[in-house]
Each structure stands twice: as structure tokens, then as C-alpha cells.
Image: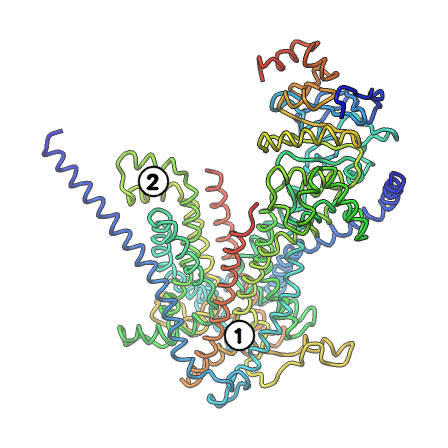
């Protein structure tokens, strides 16, 4: 298979846009005026030192903060093509989560069978047809590069899988509902290097079907995996741009300091 | 430090260490008092009561003649009352616990509810009897019936069910909840499809502990006015003609095991004391078996669930 | 495939109002269940106050608190609550003389001396003590302990406070020991290590460092024991006799607030009669007593939790 021919990618289309987003935990302002695009079928990485707000920003996209009291959104995140502001109080967080899935830092399969884990997102919206679920589960597991390993033991408990397999299962669970965006919150920080490699490869493949927004504290991972990168510090968006620009010719000194390891 | 001083120090240390041994012995002796009392109670009951245990004892009604008296109405009554207690306490307790753990916001109303639950756990059982007498028997007109007894005991064990259910729910890690919500589940879906199934062993333990407490309660039942000489069985549940007949048993007078034991113990005739011992043996056995089951369940589920 | 997914999303969105109404209904039902506890407390307050108010309209409060006889069902009735209180106080004192020393010793032993395995085996057995139905303890007190005591002291009447109090004390041991032990285990290891590093023995560390540090938690355990003793009914109803006498002598029979209520309940209780009302007045006194102890215990427990 020729590896030097790369088809030109179509120009990036806007999938989501955050506009002047402030976020408060109680009286603490965790995000300050974040305005950033998220392009469809691309991987956008959020990097920055601990406490910079990257996970907080990520969790705004699927309204995870709504689960906890004392949260306040100020500003918008618009989802395209319909242009709806998903942070609007009128918008049901459940509907947002059905269009935008999440993969967590620590793999969190449910104590159920592999099949039921992947099918859960579909069951939750009322799907019960056996054949439909089986088709979707297989497609999702294939998409997560797990089908071959588990196709004979779909009824086994998911918690018996290895760490890397569990995380791929969680990715399958996130993919099963045909989401528009998949959020990854430091997905490989709890995994060994080999598992990490396979997840990174997977992200490179699934971006053709979905949009990926990934938080990572590992800069090399961001450089390997993403098309666009955003550097955040103490709740501010310091710099955003194409990954190769950010890593090779950063415009801001703070970005350069972080990238070169002078701090953080 | 010269050798005289070091000898003195060694003597002091030896004296102090002796206290360690003495205290350890005191501790064991104190434990022995408790455990021996339990053993003495059990043995006394067994020795006095087991000879009296035969099939007739279980299938006869109480009688003025001690040799013919049995616990039929008592154990049947106990089971029927426990049925009502469970049917009321389990759903209400679980629902209340789910509300407090998963739905309630931190505000004054929630604090009031929680303070009430803690407080009610410390209210003497006879006060529940007075509540039942004043409210259920007279104001609501439920009479001195199985329904009243079941409701009263349900209220009595409600704090236990709520507290153990809350602990079981709290043991489920937050990342499981977040994973379910992230899939688009609603709050009730998360509760029904994840939290309750995963905490079932813990909830079951709490329910068993609660019921084992309820089955031995005497004071509230006496206060309601359970008669102590019941020589008939309440109608069997759902045995009458529908629709009203199905629930006839709820309004029936009744007796329970602890009341029967109380009645026999209070008589001067030692032959009845033997009956009391036999019935007590059965009751203690049942209570200890239920407690043991709950403890075993708690131990097993701590081994199995690996959060 | 794409269109059907979008169609499904539309259908799901359309059902939103119905779905949200359902969720709100479920939340309300669950709230109602949680509120049952508040309703229970209100019910208790209502019932006790309702009958007590009628009672106190006939019997002045001052008489209630100071009369030296309790003979409510006689033709010349007397309503001195202190008579019943004296029974409650005496029996509780006997019980606490057993429960507090033994319970504390056991707690210190299990927390500071015993190994993990010993503790894990012995604690559940101890807990069984509090799981035995109290009527059976009553039987035990009347028909085992009393005859045993009569061998030592032949003048002991068949019904007496001492037997009942002793058995009650043993029953309360787990309440005292369990909470005290929790309080002591909450004391950080660093305090103990400081003492051991200075050359303390286990006993010295336990009594001079851990016990004082955990004291408010231990005190709340004692208060819980007191509250339990005051509220106990059946052991006293069976073994202590039901003679209301104003006396603090445990070697005699006596009635307590709780056993009096049982006594009346065993008889015929015409609704609305004086006898009926007295049990609610007695219940109110009991409730106020246990409430005070419970609040005190709760406050102490909050204090020790704050400390760590």
C-alpha cells in the first residue's frame, strides 16, 4: 500500500465554536473568555499544566458540570450545522450527551457484560430491537478495534478485560450512538505505553467519522495525534492554531516556555 | 547514667509493662462477660426449651393447659406482620435513600429530613407504640390489627433501611455515574439501571437486619393492643372473596412470637416457663440466623465487588 | 443510516416535555418517601401533645412533677412522675455501672491492644448481644439471673431492679464499645507514635493519649448508652415488677416510665379515659428525656468529628 500518497484533506468545516465562554465553580472563575473553533473530522487537542482548565472546558461540551451544584456557564458553545447553543438553559443536557460522547481518564466500564456496555447508550434512548443492537454493537466494537478480541465473549463481564481493552470498550460505547463529537479526557494517562499507542492509532482512524476533542497532559501525544492544538493556562486560552505551528513556531512566549519544558 | 539508675529505669519499665498484660487480661475478661452471657442465655433457652419442641408445639394454639399450648398463632402472626412490615419499609426506605443520595440538594429541607432520620433511630420503641395507638388505631381507625402492627414496625425500621441503602449507594464510585450520564441517561435511568442493581447486596443486608429487629419487637405491639390469647388464625392473605376479602387478613386481630413469650413468662406456672423457653429458643435462633446471614452477606459482597 | 439517526433524535427531542414531566414526577414520589421520616416525627409530637394537653388540663403540671405517689387508676389518684422516674433512674444506673466500665475496657482493648483478626472475629459476636430480642433478655433476667442472685442474697425479691439492670447493662455494652472504639480509631496514628517514641507502653498510650483525645466521641457513646437504658421496656416489664414506688433501691421491685405504659396497655384501655391519657403524659416525659440525651450525644459526636 503506497504510503507516500496522501489524499488532500477537504478544507476544515466548523463543527463547534465556543464564544467568550466563562465558567464558574461557585464564585471561582475557572474559565475566562474562551473563544475557540472545533473543526469537523479533525482532532483538536487541549494542552496545558495541571489546573489550567482544560478538563473543565472539555466537560462544558457535554454539560457534565450540570451534575454538580454551584456551576455557572456564561457565554456560548454553538454546535453546527444547526447553530444551537448547547449551554442554553432551555437545551436538555441529555440531548447534548446523545450527540456528544465522552471517554474518561480512568476506563469506567459498567459491571455488566461487554455487549450491554456498548449497547447502553442505545438502550437509554429506547432501542430494544435485538438485531439492531447487535449490528450497532458490532460496528462500534470494530470501530474501536476490539471486535476480533471479544466477538466470542460478548456476554462476559467487561471488568475482566485488560486496562487497554477496557478503554477501547469505553471508546466503542462512545461510538455506538453515532455521536457527532467524541470528547477524550486524558484517555491514556492510566494505561501502559503499548495500550497508549493503540488508543492513539484508534483516534487517528475514528476522526474520519467523528470530530475529536482531546485533553492531554502529554505534549508528545498532542503533537502525534492532533490537527489543531490549544494551549491553556490558568483558565485562559493562550494560543490556538494548527498543531505543527504551535509546536514549531509558537507565537506566544508562554506557549514556547511550556512546549520546551521550561515550565509546567 | 550509672548502673544503679539503669536498674531503676528497668524496674519502672517492667512495672509499666505489667499493666499492659493486666489490661489485656481485663479486656479479654470484659469480652468474656459479654460472650458468656450470650452463651448462657442460649444454653439456658436450649436446655429448658428443646425438650418441649415437637411438631405439636408448632401446630397448636395457646391453651390454658401448658402441655397442649403451642405457638401456631404466634409464628403465623409474626410472618404476616413481617410481610406487611417488609412491603411498607422496603420501597419507602429505598426510595427515601435514593432521593437523599441522588436527588436532594444541600438545603435546609434536606437537613431537616436527615436530622429526623437520625433522631428517629434513637427513639425508644414504646414511643412508636404510642404513636400507633393514638394515630393508627384511633385517629385513622385501623384498629388493633396486623396492618397497624406492620405499619408501626415499618416506621421503626425505616431509619435502618434508609441508612444502609444510602451507604450502599455511596459506595458506588462517581466515575460509574459519570459514565452512565455521559451515555445520555436520565437521572432515574442511572438509578434504575445502574445504582440499584449494583447496590442490591448492601440493600438486602440492611433489610435483613431491619426485619430481624422487627421480628423481636414487643413493646410497640403490646401498646397497640395485640391480644395475648389468640386461639385462632387470621384469614390467610388473599384468601377471601375479592375485592374486599383479599385484604381481610390485614384487619384481623393477631399475636406474634414475642408477645406469646411474654404471656407465658408472666405466668407463675413453671410449665409455661418451659413453653416460653422453647418459643424463645426459636425466636433467638431466627434472629441470630438473620443477623448471621446479614453479616455473611456483608462479608461476601466486600470480597466480590472490586470498585 | 444518517437520516434514521437524525429522525430518532427528532422523535426523542419531541418527547422531551413528557420525559421531563416523568422525571419530575419520579423525583416527587422519592421526595415523599424521604419525607415519611418528618411525618413520623410530626405524628409522634402530635399524638403525645394531644393527649398530654388533655391530661394536663386535669392535672396541674406542678403536681405531676412533685407528687410522691403514682396511683393514677385508684379512686384517689396521684400523678407524681418522679415515682416512675426513680425506677427509670435506678435501673439505668445499674445498667450503666456495667455497660460503661465493661464497654470502655472492651473498646480500649479492641482498639489499642487486639490484633486485626481478633477484632474482626469478636466485634460481630459482640454485636449479636444487641441483636437479641429484649423480651428474651427479660425472660433471662427473671428466670436465670434472679434465681442466681437469690443464691447469693436470699432476701432478694422475685421481681427486682438489680437483675433487670444487670441484664440491660450487658445488652448495652455493644452500643458503648462500638462507638467508643470508632472514636478511638479515629485518633490519628501520629499521636500514638509520638507517645510510643517517648517510651510509653500500650496501656499508657491508650489511657493517657488516645482516650483523652477521643473523649468527646466516647462521651457521645456513653450518652447513647444512657439513652438506650432509659428507653428500655421489656426487660423491666418482665423482671422488675410493676410496683410504682418512689425509691432508688435496686433490690426492690419498681415501675419505670416504660414498664408503666406496658402495664396499662395490657389492661383495658378505654379511649379517652384518665388511664389512657397518663401513658401519653408518661410517654411525653420519656420522649423529652431521650431527646435531650440524643441531642447531647449528637452535639458531642459533631464536636469530635470536627477535631479530625
Residue B120 location, x and y as percent?
A: 57, 57
The residue sitting at 90% across, 39% down in the picture is C3
Residue located beneath label 1 in the image: C264
Is C65 situated above or below B15? Answer: below
Residue drawn at (58%, 47%) of the image: B171
Q: Nearer the viewer, residue A31 or B307?
A: B307
At a point 51% along the width and 61% down the height, the residue shown is C286
Residue that badge 2 annotates: C209
Pick the residue in front: B249 or C263: B249
Position above or below: A257 against C153: above
Characterize the local packing of mark 1: few (<14), some (14-19) or many (20 or more) Cα atoms within 10 angstroms: some
Residue at 67% in and 20% down: A223
Give the CA distance from mark 2 to mark 1: 50 Å
**Left or right: C216 with respect to A140?**
left
Q: Position of residue C246 (x, y in %)?
A: 40, 68
Q: Residue furthest front?
A: A1
Question: To which chain does the residue with label 1 belong?
Answer: C
Amino acid at each position: 500500500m503506497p504510503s507516500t500518497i496522501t489524499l488532500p484533506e477537504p478544507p476544515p468545516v466548523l463543527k463547534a465554536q465556543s464564544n467568550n465562554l466563562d465558567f464558574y465553580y461557585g464564585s471561582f472563575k475557572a474559565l475566562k473568555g474562551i473563544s475557540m473553533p472545533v473543526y469537523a473530522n479533525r482532532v483538536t487537542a487541549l494542552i496545558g499544566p495541571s489546573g489550567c482548565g482544560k478538563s473543565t472546558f472539555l466537560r462544558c461540551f457535554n454539560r457534565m458540570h450540570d451534575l454538580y451544584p454551584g456551576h455557572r456557564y456564561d457565554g456560548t458553545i454553538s454546535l453546527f450545522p444547526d447553530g444551537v447553543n448547547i449551554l442554553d438553559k432551555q437545551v436538555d443536557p441529555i440531548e447534548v450527551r446523545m450527540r456528544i460522547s465522552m471517554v474518561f481518564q480512568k476506563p469506567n466500564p459498567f459491571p455488566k457484560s461487554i455487549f450491554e456496555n456498548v449497547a447502553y447508550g442505545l438502550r437509554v434512548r429506547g432501542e430494544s430491537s435485538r438485531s439492531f443492537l447487535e449490528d450497532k454493537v458490532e460496528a462500534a466494537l470494530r470501530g474501536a478495534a476490539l471486535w476480533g478480541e471479544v466477538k466470542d465473549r460478548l456476554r462476559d463481564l467487561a471488568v475482566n478485560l485488560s486496562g487497554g481493552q477496557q478503554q477501547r470498550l469505553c471508546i466503542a460505547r462512545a461510538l455506538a450512538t453515532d455521536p457527532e463529537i467524541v470528547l477524550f479526557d486524558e484517555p491514556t494517562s492510566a494505561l501502559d505505553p503499548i495500550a497508549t499507542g493503540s488508543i492513539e492509532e484508534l483516534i487517528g482512524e475514528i476522526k474520519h467519522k467523528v470530530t475529536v476533542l482531546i485533553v492531554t497532559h502529554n505534549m508528545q501525544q498532542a503533537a502525534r495525534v492532533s490537527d489543531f492544538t490549544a494551549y491553556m493556562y490558568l483558565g485562559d486560552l493562550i494560543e490556538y492554531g494548527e498543531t505543527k505551528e504551535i509546536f514549531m513556531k509558537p507565537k506566544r512566549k508562554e506557549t514556547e516556555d511550556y512546549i520546551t519544558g521550561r515550565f509546567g | 547514667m550509672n548502673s544503679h539508675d539503669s536498674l531503676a529505669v528497668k524496674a519502672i519499665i517492667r512495672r509499666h509493662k505489667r499493666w499492659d498484660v493486666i489490661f489485656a487480661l481485663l479486656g479479654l475478661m470484659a469480652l468474656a462477660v459479654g460472650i458468656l452471657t450470650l452463651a448462657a442465655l442460649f444454653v439456658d433457652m436450649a436446655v429448658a426449651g428443646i425438650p418441649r419442641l415437637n411438631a405439636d408445639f408448632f401446630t397448636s394454639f395457646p391453651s390454658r393447659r401448658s402441655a397442649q399450648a403451642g405457638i401456631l398463632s404466634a409464628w403465623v402472626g409474626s410472618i404476616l406482620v413481617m410481610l406487611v412490615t417488609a412491603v411498607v419499609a422496603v420501597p419507602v426506605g429505598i426510595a427515601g435513600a435514593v432521593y437523599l443520595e441522588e436527588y436532594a440538594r444541600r438545603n435546609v429541607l434536606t437537613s431537616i429530613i436527615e436530622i429526623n432520620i437520625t433522631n428517629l433511630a434513637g427513639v425508644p420503641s414504646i414511643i412508636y407504640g404510642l404513636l400507633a395507638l393514638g394515630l393508627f388505631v384511633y385517629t385513622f381507625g385501623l384498629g388493633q390489627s396486623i396492618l397497624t402492627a406492620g405499619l408501626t414496625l415499618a416506621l421503626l425500621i425505616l431509619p435502618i433501611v434508609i441508612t444502609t441503602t444510602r451507604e450502599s449507594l455511596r459506595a458506588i464510585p462517581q466515575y460509574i455515574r459519570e459514565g452512565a450520564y455521559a451515555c445520555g441517561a436520565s437521572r432515574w435511568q442511572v438509578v434504575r439501571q445502574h445504582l440499584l442493581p449494583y447496590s442490591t447486596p448492601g440493600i438486602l443486608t440492611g433489610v435483613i437486619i431491619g426485619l430481624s429487629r422487627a421480628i423481636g419487637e414487643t413493646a410497640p405491639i403490646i401498646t397497640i393492643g395485640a391480644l395475648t390469647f389468640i386461639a385462632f388464625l387470621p384469614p390467610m392473605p388473599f384468601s377471601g372473596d375479592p375485592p374486599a376479602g383479599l385484604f381481610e387478613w390485614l384487619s384481623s386481630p393477631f399475636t406474634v412470637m414475642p408477645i406469646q413469650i411474654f404471656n407465658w413468662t408472666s405466668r407463675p406456672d413453671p410449665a409455661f416457663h418451659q413453653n416460653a423457653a422453647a418459643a424463645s429458643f426459636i425466636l433467638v435462633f431466627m434472629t441470630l440466623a438473620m443477623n448471621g446471614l446479614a453479616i455473611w452477606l456483608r462479608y461476601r459482597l466486600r470480597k466480590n465487588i472490586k470498585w | 443510516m444518517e437520516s434514521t439517526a437524525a429522525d430518532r433524535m427528532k422523535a426523542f427531542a419531541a418527547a422531551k416535555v413528557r420525559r421531563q414531566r416523568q422525571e419530575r414526577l419520579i423525583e416527587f414520589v422519592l421526595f415523599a418517601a424521604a419525607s415519611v421520616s418528618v411525618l413520623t416525627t410530626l405524628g409522634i409530637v402530635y399524638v403525645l401533645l394531644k393527649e398530654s394537653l388533655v391530661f394536663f388540663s386535669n392535672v396541674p403540671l406542678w403536681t405531676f412533677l412533685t407528687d410522691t405517689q403514682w396511683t393514677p387508676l385508684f379512686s384517689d389518684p396521684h400523678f407524681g412522675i418522679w415515682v416512675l422516674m426513680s425506677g427509670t433512674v435506678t435501673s439505668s444506673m445499674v445498667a450503666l455501672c456495667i455497660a460503661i466500665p465493661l464497654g470502655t475496657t472492651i473498646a480500649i482493648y479492641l482498639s489499642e491492644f487486639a490484633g486485626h483478626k481478633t477484632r474482626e472475629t469478636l466485634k460481630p459476636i459482640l454485636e449479636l448481644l444487641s441483636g437479641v430480642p429484649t423480651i428474651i433478655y427479660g425472660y433471662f433476667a427473671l428466670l436465670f439471673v434472679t434465681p442466681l442472685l437469690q443464691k447469693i442474697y436470699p432476701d432478694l425479691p422475685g421481681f427486682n431492679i438489680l437483675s433487670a439492670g444487670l441484664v440491660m447493662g450487658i445488652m448495652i455494652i455493644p452500643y458503648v464499645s462500638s462507638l467508643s472504639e470508632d472514636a478511638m480509631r479515629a485518633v490519628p496514628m501520629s499521636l500514638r507514635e509520638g507517645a510510643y517514641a517517648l517510651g510509653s507502653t500500650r496501656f499508657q498510650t491508650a489511657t493517657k493519649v488516645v482516650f483523652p483525645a477521643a473523649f468527646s466521641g466516647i462521651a457521645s457513646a456513653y450518652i447513647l448508652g444512657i439513652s438506650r437504658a432509659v428507653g428500655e421496656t421489656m426487660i423491666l416489664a418482665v423482671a422488675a415488677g410493676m410496683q410504682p414506688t418512689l425509691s432508688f433501691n435496686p433490690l426492690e421491685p419498681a415501675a419505670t416510665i416504660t414498664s408503666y405504659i406496658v402495664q396499662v396497655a395490657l389492661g383495658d384501655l378505654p379511649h379517652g379515659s384518665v388511664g389512657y391519657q397518663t401513658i401519653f403524659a408518661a410517654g411525653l416525659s420519656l420522649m423529652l428525656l431521650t431527646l435531650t440525651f440524643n441531642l447531647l450525644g449528637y452535639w458531642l459526636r459533631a464536636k469530635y468529628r470536627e477535631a479530625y
